[in-house]
Amino acid sequence: MQSSSFKYAGSEENEMTIRPEHPDDYNAILRLTYEAFLTSDYPGRRRVDEHYLIHLLQSSPFVIPELCFVTEQDGEIVGHIEHGFTRGAAYYGRACK
């Protein structure tokens, strides 16, 4: 898969690259996710929820690696998206298939 480059406001200093996620991106993705949700707060939320979920999903068979991407700016990961699939646990009391 080829990377795509996007230039914002016609300025090279704002150029970002979207590319497939690589195993060596793992620590940067965890740090980015932790920092992104650091100020989120709601009843019952633990401070480790989002980046811990990324950690749990990393080796999950439900993640679709071909659909996991990072966004880089100046060599630093500034965005991440991870796609996966699941079955619904219940739909009106019945298991979904």
Image (cartoon, rainbow, N blue to C red):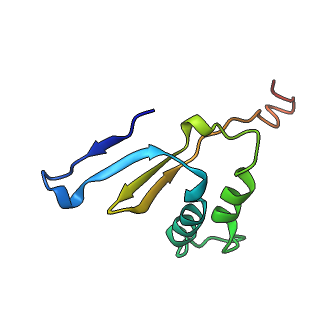
62 displayed left or right of 20: right
Whole-percent x, y for residue 48 in the image:
68, 71
Q: Residue furthest top?
A: 97
Task: Residue at 39%, 46% (x, y): give it.
Answer: 18
Does residue 48 sit above or below 13 in this rendering? Answer: below
Which sits in the foreground, 52 or 7? 7
Q: Examine the image and state in which quarter residue 94 appears.
A: top right
Task: Residue at 50%, 67% (x, y): give it.
Answer: 36
Q: Residue furthest front?
A: 24
Whole-percent x, y for residue 17 in the image:
34, 49
Which sits in the foreground, 49 or 12? 12
Q: Examine the image and state in which quarter residue 53 appears.
A: bottom right
92 displayed left or right of 20: right
Task: Residue at 70%, 73% (x, y): give it.
Answer: 46
Q: Is the C terminus in the top left, top right, bottom left or bottom right quadrant?
A: top right
Which sits in the foreground, 44 or 81? 81
Q: Residue furthest right?
A: 94
Whole-percent x, y for residue 15 in the image:
25, 54
91 displayed left or right of 33: right
Whole-percent x, y for residue 29 in the image:
55, 61
Task: Residue at 12%, 51% (x, y): give it.
Answer: 10
Which sits in the foreground, 5 or 33? 5
| Count of numbered labels shown in the rendering | 0
Does residue 2 sit above or below 55 in this rendering? Answer: above
